[in-house]
Image (cartoon, rainbow, N blue to C red):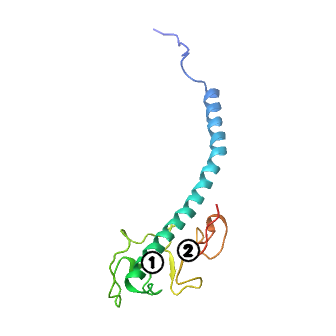
Amino acid sequence: MNIPARPNPRGFTLVEILVVIIIIGLLAALVGPRLFGKVGTAKLKTAKAQIELFGTALDALRLDVGRYPTSEEGLKALREKPSGMENWKGPYLPKEIPVDPWGKPYVYKSPGEHGDYDLISYGLDGTPGGEGENEDVVNWKDIKG
């Protein structure tokens, strides 16, 4: 017994599916770069906010101890008492020292070339200088944007 094949009017044709895929691809191509551009800017702002938080904690430590940590003591002095800091009343940060938004450690120098201390994130490329997401984020100047 042969049953004749019935056309299914509720299905989509291959052409209709391809048109939808092309439209989705065009939308992704137009919107995607704009969204990914915002990610780089957000990382720069996050690094600046973290550097400002470190600065506040370093100032609190200085008020208690009378000096900023040396380069050798580093930002670790905000969480753990270094030897020779008798009036240390920390920890000065509630959590461990984070890495920058690109996964690299912040650079701390004291005394600094631009003040009592320098705090630096070298951006995406991890080297001094650069523009965009490679721009250095530092405590002595504001970031663009």
Q: Nearer the viewer, residue 117 or 39?
A: 117
Structural distance between the alpha carbons of marks 2 and 1: 13 Å
The kind of residue on which mark 1 rests is Asp
**At x 66% / y 45%, what residue is drawn?**
29
The dot on residue 134 is: none
Query: Residue 121, how many percent across, how many down?
Result: 55, 73
Q: Is 1 drawn above or below residue 126 in the view shown? A: above
In the picture as drawn, the residue positioned furthest to the bottom comes out as 84
The kind of residue on which mark 2 rests is Asn
Left or right of 121? Residue 59 is left
Indicate the secondary structure of the residue bearing disc 2: loop
Nearer the observer, disc 2 or disc 1?
1
Query: Residue 136, how many percent across, how many down?
Result: 61, 72
Q: Is residue 27 visible?
A: yes
- Report the label total: 2
Quadrant of the image occupied by residue 69? bottom left
Query: Residue 75, how many percent across, how many down?
Result: 43, 79
**At x 45% / y 87%, what residue is drawn?**
72
Judging by the rendered image, the residue that carries numbered circle 2 is 139
Instruction: Name the quarter where the N terminus is drawn.
Output: top left
Quadrant of the image occupied by residue 88? bottom left
Q: Is 16 drawn above or below residue 9 in the view shown? A: below
Badge 2 density bin: few <14, some 14–19, many ≥20, Cα 10 Å: many
The dot on residue 59 is: 1
In the picture as drawn, the residue positioned furthest to the front comes out as 63
Left or right of 28? Residue 75 is left
Q: Is residue 101 visible?
A: no
**At x 56% / y 15%, what residue is drawn?**
9
Instruction: Name the quarter where the C terminus is drawn.
Output: bottom right
Indicate the secondary structure of the residue bearing disc 1: helix
Quadrant of the image occupied by residue 21? top right
